[in-house]
Image (cartoon, helix red, strand yellow):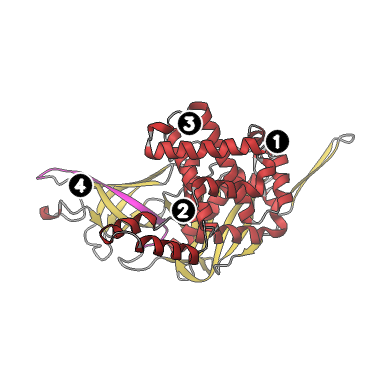
Amino acid sequence: MRIEEEYRRSGFFWIPGEEHNKIPGKLSVTDGGVIELEIIGHFNNDINSLQDYKLPRIVGDVEKDGLVTLDNCFYKNKNIAFGGISKSLVAVNKMLAGAAWDIDEPITFNTFHFSIDCLEEWVGISGIKISTDHINKRSAIVYQSPKNISLPLNNGITLEICFSSRLPAQANTAEATISQKVHFKLISPKLIELDEFTTAAFKITNLMCFATDEIVSLKNVSATSTDLQELIGDKPYPARISLYYQSHPFSIKKPKKNWREMLFRFTSIQTNAQQVFNNWLNAYEYLEPAINLYFSTKTGGHKYLEGRFLALAQGLETYHRRTSNTTLMSPEIFEKVTSEIIESCPEHHRDWLEGRIKHGNEINLGKRLKSIIEPFKEHLGTSAKRSKMLRQIVDTRNYLTHYNENLSELSATGAELWNLCVKMEVIFKLHFLKVVGFTSDEISSVIENHYPMKHMLQEI
């Protein structure tokens, strides 16, 4: 989670139901969504509890925000002073500013609002219109807020792309500023657990990483519930609860992405955006391990090039396993062959043999990779270049997995290993475009208009 303005609040904190034992402390949230609570002493002054680092839910009353709820906490540093003052440090998984929940009360909401880095550039829809008359030195700026875009999802939640604006508050003889912001809103017709919203937001953020070809982060998160109302004037409205937590993916450096550098924008999928979002969310049901392996290589999860290569190779293999049931022979024939082999084996070696041939009907990595690139072979160089690339991937994977000296000279290193990673990443992107619903012609158009991918493919 991106925290654009560091959060620091002083207040009093207590365990729900133990309001008599309020402790002064300082609450902080730093960029990335790291939440820490520094308190004087600790919530249980019993010396026998020093080894217990788990904490239930914590409630606080802090400056500016009022009530806050700190969920899933534990002591990072727990001290007790004998006659003096000591400080303890508590790590917090999630923070909700604006309300307090009881110790075991479920945290449920109807709506979940969040923005993402570069979202305005990705959506590419503006309500600002400018007309200029140079001859008469006249200009006019008109703003008409775009209508929110509603995309019903298959999981019963509706995703809205929402537009908001900031207009000049009063006349200014020197300057007038209009700014437009875009954010996502998830809407549920019934109250659902907070984790359901955060899981959906995580998957959508990953889709934005893929679409923008950049590591973008969640920010400005809030939620509302029909059970939490506040009076504005004489009318009750759902109270806006601000949320903070360590969401992924996250990059320390805030990205700046021109729309021309993105893989595709909302305007490219506007006519079938609902299907694209649903296809991506549905893909997690059968492709989640492969998707996670791919994004682990994009978010800095692997400090060394060899680790990145292995994750991409494993990811492509996993992708094929989850999308194809191809085997060396039909299950019926394989069962017949293995039965004949086991029956002919001495009885005291049968357990060993069964273990060795249990997965014998699976195709090898080379055949899986060949099948994976088949739909896009026209973009992946000549037959000779494709065969060389696949052979290098297989030999390098086998060497880095088993470190067999016979494969050391065949394994790619340095710039060659880097290029293999780039090629595998491109293959992943092509398949993800197919997963979200792009046609062959649309994929060709993406390749033609996205210079980084076009350049990568030219290097193959």
Q: Amino acid at mark 2?
A: Pro
Disc 3 to disc 4: CB gap under 8 Å: no
Q: Secondary structure at mark 3?
A: loop
What secondary structure is found at the residue carrying circle 2?
helix
The Cα atoms of the two marked residues, 3 and 1, are separated by 68 Å
> Is residue 318 among what the camera can see?
yes
Disc on the earlier residue, 3 or 1: 1
Q: Are marks 1 and 2 in contact (CB under 8 Å)?
A: no
The residue pinned by badge 3 equals: 410
Among the two numbered marks 1 and 2 on one chain, the one whose residue lies closer to the N terminus: 1
Percent of width and height locating residue 215: 53, 42
- Which-is-in-front pick, marks 3 and 4? 3
Crowding at mark 1 (Cα within 10 Å: few <14, some 14-19, many 20+): few
Q: Residues within 10 Å of mark 4 (few under 14, many from 20)?
A: many
Q: Residue at x 85, y 35 (%)?
A: 137
Task: State which region is magenta.
Answer: 82-100
Residue at horizontal 56 percent and vertical 44 percent from the top: 117
Tell me whether circle 4 and circle 1 mark residues in contact (CB < 8 Å).
no
Q: Which residue is mark 2?
A: 289
Residue topped by disc 1: 174
> In terms of depth relative to the viewer, which is nearer, 280 or 417?
417
Residue type highlighted by circle 3: Leu
Quadrant for the C terminus, please: top right
Q: Name the N-terminal-most of marks 2 and 3.
A: 2
Question: Is 318 positioned to the left or the right of 259 in the image?
Answer: left
Other residues around mark 2 within 10 Å, as few (<14) / some (14–19) / many (≥20)? some
The image shows residue 394 at horizontal and vertical percentages of 49, 40
Of circles 4 and 1, the one toward us is: 4
